[in-house]
Image (cartoon, grey):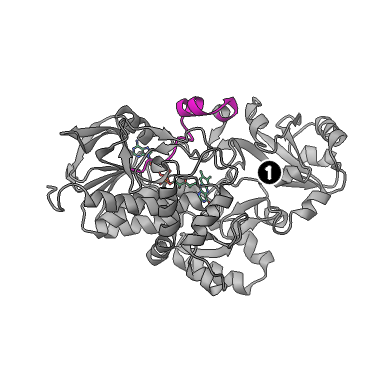
Amino acid sequence: MVPIPDSFDLIIVGSGGSGMAAAIEAATAGAKVLILEKAPEIGGATARSVGTYSTSSTPHQKRAGIEDSPERHYADMDLVNANAKYPDNLGLRRLLTFGAPDTFRWLTELGIEFIGPNIEPPQTRPRMHNVIPSSAAFPYYLGRKCEALGVTTRCNAQVTDLIFNDGRVAGVSVRMTDGETESYRANHGVILTSGDFAASPEYRARFFDQAVVNSVAAYPLATGDGLRIAERHGARIVNGDYAAFYIPRLRFIPPSQPNWVMRLPPSRIVARMIRWGTALMPAAIMRPFVMKFITTILGPEQNLFKAGAAMVNASGKLLPVELKSPAKHLALDPSNSGFIILDGRIADQFEAWPNFISTAPGVAHAYISDYRAARKDVFHEAQSLDALARRIGIDPAALGEAVAEHNHTATEPLARPPFIALGPVRGYVSITEGGLAVTDDLHVLGSDDKPIPGLFAAGSAGQGGVLLDGHGHHLAWAFVSGRQAARTAMQSGPSLSAAG
Ligand SMILES: Cc1cc2nc3c(=O)[nH]c(=O)nc-3n(C[C@H](O)[C@H](O)[C@H](O)COP(=O)(O)OP(=O)(O)OC[C@H]3O[C@@H](n4cnc5c(N)ncnc54)[C@H](O)[C@@H]3O)c2cc1C
């Protein structure tokens, strides 16, 4: 193994979208960069996301004849956030909406391909772009670029604390998975890009209710380490109890076996073949193929329940569904596992925009036919309720009773075959919104609301009260803020190459 120096220009804590974007930005400017990642591989939640990226002013929009601008995107965020319980951080909103087009271009120049744009009401322009073939393309291309630029990346390395020198953050302490401890120094300081706290029992209990505490974390290493470390040194969390997407959120369990499509590299060649295939081949062939590139757990939309679907637990007992948080009672159920039950009437409605089952990689929105063709592991269908119950391993009498109870109060009963069960679904926490309070250029603020010298944050860890509701703003924020944090860090501290 090549020996690793213990001193760098910049240390980056976490290798998700924000961390890798920060590393590339700093290394391109000539900095000697170290990424520390506690997982065995790079990517974080970014590599497990659906892969939507919302922005204005893309070549995709131009090709589709859509006139748009960062100013309009900025203004539309008022519509997106109309029901938010907290005011937006307008400085960070500006950074997001004005930085997103250039960072989109930057990602495509690295090799990442997107399709779209798709409309996402209440935004007034189609802005949602989807990565193809899947979000695995992010670590694939950003990781390659880091390597090409000579960024040092250490996996299995958990940052446990900051090291200060004369009141300035000058390095980090690290615990390796083998139990060894190490320390590294950086003369431009440290960027916390360690993600959110969706998997931290302690932070969930501090900010949310029992349903959230009971839920499964979509990315199990999102334990809020960067927030905890920064709080220890006087920083504070903004919007800890805010949820842009209702949490817990219903999500399908991931496929138990990787299929052959998932083993294809998430490269530009594969992406272009998909783009070409999508343009030239029948949708019935291409959509199931594209949907097999699963790197994420897909989340069924609450519209299914508005249309009259029911939810039962793993034993077939009917569960209440609150439209604001359909997964709440499932997460409170000891099994935290169940099925969404619908009939032919609802299935017919969920075949075209705006009634989709979920967003999905490659196809943007997935409908009943997509699930029937591509996700047989979570799509079950039968001509009678009894046959459906047997197919999903539930006592037919229990399912019959649950549907009868549901029909008793439903506006339209579940009555028209075929009967469909979607699941297993579970209550998940995929995204939390609490990030460190930061300046508009992503310096972390300390106890007296003054920047902590040498400490920066980006991505979820540096969310700073910017509201990211609507699909595709979290990833845009991760990449845009990662690049900005690196620029800010490199402008602070001594000039380059003092690291030894
Ligand atoms: C299932 C799912 C689907 C999603 N889909 C979308 C979508 O389609 N569009 C969208 O905009 N957003 C989506 N999101 C949200 C989006 O993925 C995240 O907000 C974004 O990726 C956060 O990027 P990040 O760089 O801040 O954090 P991450 O990508 O999570 O990276 C943080 C990294 O830091 C590492 N780390 C943590 N603590 C330490 C430590 N102490 N030491 C060293 N390393 C550490 C973690 O292991 C991780 O690799 C989705 C999220 C999930 C879970």
> Does residue 208 show up magenta in the picture?
yes
Look at 77% across and 47% down and name the residue there.
381
Observer-nearest of 293 and 129: 129
State the image coordinates of residue 270 (x, y, percent, origin top left).
Answer: 49, 66
Residue neighbourhood size for the residue with mark 1, other residues' Cα within 10 Å, grouped as few (<14), some (14–19), many (≥20): many
In terms of depth relative to the viewer, which is nearer, 481 or 331? 481
Q: Disc 1 marks which amino acid?
A: Gln
| Position of residue 138 in the picture relative to residue 486 (left or right) | right
> Does the beta carbon of the residue at mark 1 sit less than 8 Å from ligand 1?
no
Asked whether the viewer can see residue 167, the reply is: yes
Q: Residue at x 38, y 47 (%)?
A: 42
Q: Check if residue 313 falls in the magenta segment.
A: no
Residue 5 locus on image (x, y percent): 17, 45
Toward the viewer: 422 or 493? 493
Q: Give the percent coordinates (x, y) of residue 140.
A: 40, 56
Q: Which residue is mark 1?
A: 302
Q: Work out whether 277 lies above or below 265.
A: below
- Rendered location of residue 342, percent (x, y): 78, 44
Task: Tell whether 64 sits left or right of 103.
Answer: right
Write down the region rendered in magenta.
192-212
Q: How many marks?
A: 1
Query: Which quarter holds ligand 1?
Result: top left
Assign a secondary structure to mark 1.
loop
